[in-house]
Image (cartoon, rainbow, N blue to C red):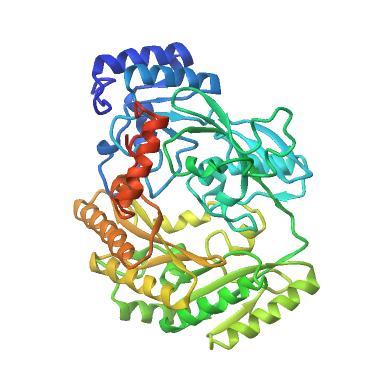
Amino acid sequence: MNKLSVLPAGVSASALAKAIEEFSGILGREHVIVEPERLAPYRKIYIAVAEDAVAPSAALMPSSVAEIQKILAVCNRHKVPVWTISTGRNIGMGSAAPATRGQVILDLKRMNRIIEVDAELGSALIEPGVTYLDLKDYIDEHKLPFWVDAPSPGPIVSPIGNTLERGHGYTINQDHVYSFSGMEVVLANGEVIRTGFGPLPNCKSWQAFRSGYGPYIDGMFTQSNFGIVTKMGIWLTPVQEGAKSFVVYYNRREDLAPAIDTFRKLRLAGTISVSGSVLSGLTLLGFGQRKSSFYSGTGAIPREEVDALLKERGLPQWRVGGVVYGDDEETTIKLKKIRRAFEATNPAQVLIEDSSGVVPSWGEGDLASATGQLSLDAFRILNFVGGGGVMWHMPVSAMKGRYVEQLCTMSEGILRRFGFDYLAMNWCNDRDMHQTTGIFFDRTDPAQMRAAYDCYDALMQETSRAGFGNYRCSIHYMDKAAELFGPELRSFLRSIKRAVDPAGILAPGKSGVHI
């Protein structure tokens, strides 16, 4: 395999070689990666497609906006496409790989400055290479009274990357697309713009007031290929006076709908402070044990055997968990209301955090996550099957019990149809519920790869037709996911793409958007 054997669509080997030479002049040869062994981390994927199908041709590691501008000038001259990543840890949806084979990875991990942390406003201006762990370490070192709000893989991912993918965390700033203010963006032509009040000299509110003046454009740069975000203001969560958690167990599958409705009412009333989780019983088991340790058959574990297994292990069909904030008096009142509300739904058990803080939990723990702690424990579920394969299906439902029950039942049925177990984490917000359903498979088994690919397609298509849209998807499915939202929207987005990136060099195919 020669160094430039992988080429972007429509780009000749000579054009790419010339571009690589120019990139090396900008960055230095050590920051231009073309060797197969150095490109291996960018090819590592967990999804059900061959690595070769999404292999990059090269990777570039700029350290400044000026270098990005020079890179884009080269890309425009030679029509070389670039796929931008912050840390490239989008595990289960493509990791660092591009949506289409041959794109050059623009890896921003060297742009890792924490530019400013405002201890009065609770905001941080950062670059894409900063991770949640970097930010937490800064806060801890300077003894600032704030928490970071991180998703499950928080220590290793970028707040900017997660926000641009519309990710979620666990504190009061959990909806990340609503918990930032101010972007700096490099456009395809090399121009740099700042959103909100950022263009004003000596601006006093760039990280305080998101919308600024005129059309609100920040959303255009989330899940898009309209520009490269190089700075962002992230809102931090003030350390709360206190936090306590609760867990509710249900032993019947039909208890899901009343549990969801009860949670929604308590959340809308402000009794429950932040988003909660609803996990299936098999998911609870999957965080701690490998499937082969308790089941020797093939395909999905039969439903009756799952029921028997949960009963034998003392696990519920559903586990509902949440957190309340406040001082001891306030949390005591809230937890009494929560206990009373859930006990009216006839659960198997309602557990309230005791003085030692011991409540059965999952993964990194609801209380730990809701108080700004970071952990990689949630990744333990990737060992459920083994073999390095996982894809996440992420549909959204209104927070109505009957809808959530419909979605969960539908998802389980589709997974079983293709031989996969139903392991799902449902995140309950104010008015919506995000479901994260895992397809776990062995990437070394061609039959499992094919089944996982087909299962993902069925999940996307069938849940969308039932009215449950997906808010994120795997890189291999981006065009098909965009088709689900109709031709009118795709045409509109294509018009924007042609206006801001006429050469189509920025992440072609991202979210199904092409020139």
Above or below: residue 193 compared with residue 406: above
The reply to whether residue 111 is visible in this rendering is no
Q: Nearer the viewer, residue 441 or 176?
A: 176
What is the quadrant of the N terminus in the image? top left
Query: Which residue does the image show at 51% across and 23% down from the upper left?
Result: 191
Query: Which residue does the image show at 23% across and 19% down from the upper left?
Result: 12
Above or below: residue 92 compared with residue 81: below
**Quadrant of residue 118 within the rendered picture:** top right
Q: Tell me if 59 is positioned left or right of 332 in this view.
A: left
Q: Nearer the viewer, residue 332 or 162?
A: 162
Query: Which residue does the image show at 48% across and 66% down from the upper left?
Result: 433
**Quadrant of residue 309 within the rendered picture:** bottom left
Residue 147, image x, y percentages? 69, 51
Q: Residue furthest left?
A: 447
What is the quadrant of the C terminus in the image? top left
Above or below: residue 455 compared with residue 18: below
